[in-house]
Structures are given as C-alpha cells and as structure tokens.
Image (tube, rainbow, N blue to C red):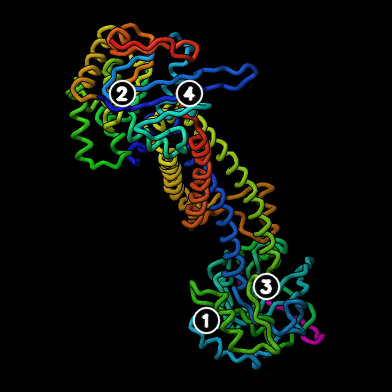
Amino acid sequence: MLKLAWRNIWRNKGRSAITIAAVMFCVIFAVVLRSFQIGVWENMTHEIVANNFGYLQLHQKGFWADQTLDNSLELASVNEQIFLDHPDVKGLIPRIESFSLVSTGEGTKGTLVMGIDPQRELPGLQLDQFLVQGSTFAPDDKSVVVAEGLAKFFNLSIGDTLLFIGQGYHGASAYGRYPVVGIARMRNPELNKQLVLMPFKEAQFMYNCVGRATTLVVDLEEGASYKQVNQELLAAIGLSALELLSWEQLFPEIIQTIEADMAGGQIFISILYVIISFVLLGTVIMMVAERQREFGILVSIGMRKSKLAMVTVMENLILTMGGALLGMAIVKPVQFYFKYNPIDLSGQMREAVERFNFEPKLHTTTSFMININHGSIIFLIGSLVSLYAVWKIMTLNPVKSMRS
Amino acid sequence: MSKTVIEVKDLFKVYEGPVPVKAVNGISLTIKEGEFTALKGPSGCGKTTLLNMLGGLDYPTSGSILVGGNDITSLGENELIDFRLRNIGFVFQAYNLIPVLSATENVSFIMLLQNRPKEEREDRARQLLQSVGLTGKEDKRPGELSGGQQQRVAVARALASKPQFVLADEPTANLDSESTANLLDIMLKLNKEEGMTFVFATHDDRVINRARRVVAISDGKVVSDLSK
C-alpha cells in the first residue's frame, strides 16, 4: 500500500510539488511570524526583567502598590541567609528608588534616582558596560552617573554638578549636590531620558533612610526557574511584613500586552491556516477528480474502499509531512539569523516600541517548539483535508466512477 | 455435465427518473463452467448493465444472481468487494490498469489484495504474462505498452486471482484487428486449456464470431440464445 501511495505521489509531480510547496511556505511563514513575535517579547522581557528589575523582588509589604520611601524596608528585618542558602540564588541586591528634582545651571527636571551598588547589580545596571563618557562610582563615592538622554537635556559634561531636592523617608528633606563622574547609555529608552544613578549608601543618606532599601532584587543563577524559586522562598521566609513578587506581579501590563499581541498574531496565523486549508483541499479535490475512474476500477477488481482510502490518506500525509518537515528545516537558519542579527525598527514603529520602554529591535526566538507546533498544526490540517478523499472513496459507486 | 457457474433469475434493473428506464427487463440466464459466451446487442440494450450486475458492481431492482449457488444480490458492499476479489476477473474496454505499477505489479496487485505470499505472486504474475505473450515486458508500465499489450496485461490480471469466471466488457473496442485476433486467441486458449469461463459484453463481430455461445439482448431482454 505504501509503495502504491509513494508511486502515486510521483505520478503527478506538479500537483505533489504544489502541495509540498504550499505546506512548506505556510510552515515557514507561520514559524517566522511567530518566532519574531515570541522572540521580540522574549528579548524585551529579558531586557526589562532579567537585566534591570530582576525576576523576583522583595519589598516591604505594600510598597509596590504605593511606591514611596515611607514603605521602604528595614534591611535588618530581612534574614538574607535564607536567600543565600537557596542554591539558585546568587544574592540580594539592594536599591533605593525614588524621585528628585534635579537642576544644573538654568535647567531643572524631575528625575528617577536609583541608589545602587554597580558591582553587585544586574547586567543592565553594571555601569562600566554602558558608559559613554567618564567612569562609574565606587560604593563609598559621593558622585553620580547620569543617563545619556538626561545628560543631553542638561547639556552635561563630566565634572558638572547636579543639585537634588526632594522628599526623603518620613517627610524629611532630601537634598544634595553631586558631581557627574559618568554618562551612561541605558538600553531602556525611557530610563535613558530620566535616570540618575548614585551609590546606594549615598542615596540612603540623601533620602534619610540609612539602614533601609526600597527594593531587594533577588539575583538568580542563570537558567534558574524563578517560579520554583519564588515558591520555595515564600515557604522559607514567611511574609508577614514583606512581599516577594515575581516579574508578572510587578508588571502585569507587560503580560497583558504580550497576551494581546499574541492573540492578534494568532488571528493572523489562523487566517493563514484557513488559506492553506483551502489550498490543500483544492489539491485533494483535483486528485480525487483526476483519479475517480481509477478508484472505480480498484474497487471493481476487489480493493476494499477502506484500503483505497488508506492509500490516498498515506499519499496526503507523506506530502504534508514532507512539506512540513522541509518548512521546519528551511526556516531554522532564518530564525538563527534574525536572533543574532535583529532588525532595527525605525519611524513610528520605533517610537511605539520605545513608548513601552523596549529596545526597538526585532529579534527571533530559536525555540524549536514553534517549528514543531506549527509543523504539527499544518500536518493536522493536511490530515483533516485528506478526509475529503476518504469521504469521496467511501461513497463512490464503482460503475459511475468508471464511466467518469 | 458442466456445473453451473452463474444462474440469473428474473433479473430487472430499472433506472428511476421522470421516465423510468428498464435497462434489464426480466432476464433469466445460466452460464456453465468453461463457456465462452458473448452477450451481444446494440448500444443501450442493457448488456453492460447485465454484465455489471453479474460482476456484483451494481444491484438489480429485483431478481437474483446465483454464483456457485450463492445469491450475490443479498451481499453487503464489503462482502461483494471480497466476493469479486475471490471469484471474478474483469477485463474492461479501456484496459484500466494502474498507471504507476509495472505489468507484473498490475497482475500481482490482485494477489496482494488476497494476501498471497510475495513469491507466489511474482511466480504467477510471470507465468500469466508469459501465457498472454508478454515475456520481456514484465517491468514496463502501462504507458510504455501498446493498447493490445495493455489489454493482454488486463487479461492476465483478470486471471491472477484464479476466478470462477471472467467478465469482459467490450474488451476489443479499442484494439486493431491484429491485436483483437491475438487477444481472442489467448482467451480461447485459456478457455480450452484451463477451462476458464468467459462472458463478454460486445457488439464486435470479431468476438461474436469466435464465441461458442451468443446471447442476443434487445431492450433489456434476451431475444436469442444460440450455442455453436
């Protein structure tokens, strides 16, 4: 039966080629589309979460809902050893995050101030990698690094001085005067326009919250499952006065945006599936019409309809599987290419992406699951479409078919 | 005395429509083992309809067809297909070979459906092709053979399942005189040497002249039945 099916495939090479090509291009198109969609979000999420905010953050309970220094946590109240004992936790990274009015010369602007220890920080805040001018600060220094966009706004140079005035812990005045020792280009475009970084200790001092931090980022080992770590830490620390939040809880709007975008992409791909279904159905209808007479003969000479149907299903499955496998294989280098050579966005698209604080580049994901998923779906469509041939065979009248 | 292979009793086939057409109108007929029978008549007289019903390809409106004592009109679709596979060989006007299979494979295909062992299939196919004069053409596909050669492959295929009888519907209609004579020689040889029963539906005088029994049909009825 398989031999017969195989030879039938080669008897009308044009039709077989159309079927294989249709399936192949559908798989390629669907996988490329989905790879870009998922890849962009993977990259954006990694950019935002892994490099800047961390997959898990520990706060004083209620801080995330009301992000003021009054809701900062007392570092002494956190048993850091429990975190360090977890094999997937590298450490806790303390931060002070607040706002301040900054001025220099005649310019004044509201800015986001982060007190950090660059040597302990996540990759997105390891300043030496992002400096475009000057140098970074040491933990005990009394100086600041300014984001490039903000530096442009103030027309700053290394050695210029910035004045800070704001509100500290429990209503205390927060003010200070710090020289600019470096200008850094932040990957996140929004942060690049408004961020000032200063040593963690100096931020504690300026905001009158010595011994406190607004956030402790849980620094995870590469490849660790943050969900699992989250569960295990929650069980270990008992959170009466603290909150341990995953990035999904911290940024639900990102999840919603991803889901909305994915749903949109799914609709587009569904339309593609409908089109390919009709293309495949067309080739099956052509095949059945061409071989109507032959089907009649085979049934006449004693071939059961079920066996004949099986042969045609085999033919169709071989063709769709061939197309799907080809598509899955051909698209793989494309996925790898755009993973490491992302497309730079420009114009309105760039602005739109930047508005969401994401890097304006289109990356792909190289996950083979996408190829398998879409290859399988299209293979399934091919299988379903071959049911038309099964139906026609099971209902054929051999005499009428032979006359056709 | 030869045993009865086919016994047709009061067979009717009516095609319903605005004006019902009686394609077969009360035919009763007996075919004995080893007969070489031609059903003759003009186009539309009902001979192909009768042949289709004898072969279990079509159901009669009423009447019975006994093959080896079994009424095939009472069989279900799959039973009929299996019955055809085991008992009937078909030769069609347009050869109707499977284009993607070689001559040997076309002949052995029936035996494959019968789940016969590969060695037996190949031996019998080779033997049958030899008996129809196609030695050396075993590996040719239908497209590489002439019309006469294709029809001889069809005859070999019809005999492959060791059927009780062979039904041939206008087998010479597409053949030239030489091929027709050649084909009839082969069929008569198989009829004489192996006792194979042949029933033809034809209006070709070349076949009718060589048949040993000629049943004339007109308007769905047997109008004469002559044995030579």
Eye-nearest disc, 2 or 1 = 2
Direction bottom: furthest residue = A76
Measure the alpha-carbon separation of dots 4 and 3: 82 Å
Residue located at (67% from left, 72% from top): A249
Q: Is residue A74 left or right of residue A139?
A: right
Most common SS among magenta residues? strand
Q: Are marks 2 and 3 in contact (CB under 8 Å)?
A: no
State which chain disc 2 sits on: B
Eye-nearest disc, 4 or 3 = 4
The reply to the same-chain question for discs 2 and 4 is: yes
The reply to the same-chain question for discs 2 and 1 is: no
As drawn, A315 above or below A238: above
Q: Earlier in the sequence, mark 1 or mark 3?
A: 1
Residue A190: percent from left, percent from top: 69, 62
Q: Are marks 2 and 4 in contact (CB under 8 Å)?
A: no
Q: Which dot marks residue B32?
A: 2
